[in-house]
Structures are given as structure tokens and as C-alpha cells.
Image (tube, helix red, strand yellow):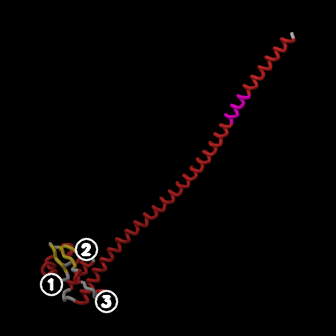
Amino acid sequence: MIDKVRELLKQIDNLVTYEHSRLEDEIDSLKKQLSEINELDLEYDNLKKEAKKIADENKELKNDNKKLINEVQQLEYFKNKYEKLEEEFKKKTMLLSGLKFTLKVITTWIPSQKENISVLLALASLDNYSSNYDKLSKKTKIPVVTLKNRVVPLLKEKNLVIETQNVITLNLDALDDDTEEIF
């Protein structure tokens, strides 16, 4: 009976050894899995940090974009204002050139007829210094017939206006460099 007990103890010992080995292998496998999980956790934390960093950069870029949009809108306002002022400056410059021309004519040649001066002043104040007979008549209150037969021919003779297809234009080429001395 002792032999049987010894045999049983030996079998139990073998069984315990086998189970112990199996459990150690399982523990090693679980440790390896736990290590992999820890590595994944670390990677996950790193990815979260990177995602937060990217989100912060994105937010900062959006704020910068909004600031740039505001600056562009302000610059658009100033651009429009500049263009309006530039257009107004061009008109004033044209008017000044016309008035300089008229002043030169008046200071160097004063015709005996008041109508001639009225026509020159009217042309100097118009865009492109040009007008047809009807508009010029309305502006100066001089009848069209008088303009056609007396005033414009006299001004053409003095080389102060050019007539092209019933459009009268100041002859700015008659304005020489001496004009600056007047001012």
C-alpha cells in the first residue's frame, strides 16, 4: 500500500510540476501581453498629446486666419477710399489744367467779346474739355448760331479750340511751358 501511495504521490508531483510549468508559461504569455498593452498605452498617450498639439496649432492658425481676414477687409476699405480720392484728384487735375489754359488765354489775349471768355471757361470746366454746340449753348447761354458763326471760328483762328464733327475741344497744345510762371 505504501508503494501505491508513493506511486500516487509521484503522479501528484508530476501533475503539480506539469501544472506549474504550464502556469509559468501562461504567466509569461500574460506578462508579454501586459507589456504590449503598456507599450500601446504609451503610444496612445503620445498620439493623444500629438493630437492635442495639432488641435492647438489648428486653433492658432484659425485665429491668425481671422486676423488676416480682418486686415484684408480694412485694407479693402482703404483701397476703395484711395481709388475714390485718386479719381477725384484726376478730375481736379483736369479742371486745373483747363483753368490754367483759360487763365493763360485771358492774360495773354483778352478778346473784345465776353462770349469768347465764357466759352473758354465753360470748356475748361467740362470733362475732357469737350462739348457739342447744344451743351455749350446751355452752359454759356449763348445761342448755337452765335457759337457756330462767330465765337468758335474766332477761337479756332486763335488756335484755342479744335472743332471735330460739331464737338468743340480746348486746344491744350496751345498751352506752352510759360503757364507755370503765371502761378
Q: Quadrant of the N terminus?
A: top right
Check residue 56 for magenta coloring. Answer: no
Give the total of numbered labels.
3
User: Regarding mark 3 in the picture, which secondary structure is present there?
Assistant: helix
The residue that label 3 is drawn on is 181
Q: Main secondary structure of the magenta part?
A: helix
Pointer 2 residue = 128
The crowd level at tag 2 (other Cα within 10 Å; few <14, some 14-19, many 20+) is: some
Name the N-terminal-most of marks 3 and 2.
Answer: 2
The mark closer to the camera, 3 or 1, is 3
Closer to the eye: label 3 or 2: 3
Find the magenta span and give its range.
24-34
Give residue 31's quadrant in the image: top right
Taking the spot 12% from the left edge, 80% from the top edge, the residue there is 149
Q: Which residue is under mark 1?
A: 157
State which tag comes first along the sequence, 3 or 1.
Answer: 1
Q: What kind of element bears circle 1?
A: helix
Residue type, mark 3 in image: Glu
CA gap, disc 3 and disc 1: 25 Å
In the current view of this chain or complex, which residue is farthest to the left? 149
Residue 119 at what x, y percent from top left? 21, 80
Disc 3, disc 1: CB below 8 Å? Answer: no
Query: Which x, y percent locates residue 20?
Result: 76, 25
Q: Nearer the viewer, residue 86 or 151?
A: 86
Q: Position of residue 76 (x, y in %)?
A: 42, 63
Residue 81, placed above or below residue 59: below
Is 31 placed above or below 161 here? above
Q: Amino acid at mark 1?
A: Glu
Residue at disc 2, secondary structure: helix
As shown in the figure, which amino acid type bears the numbered disc 2? Answer: Asn
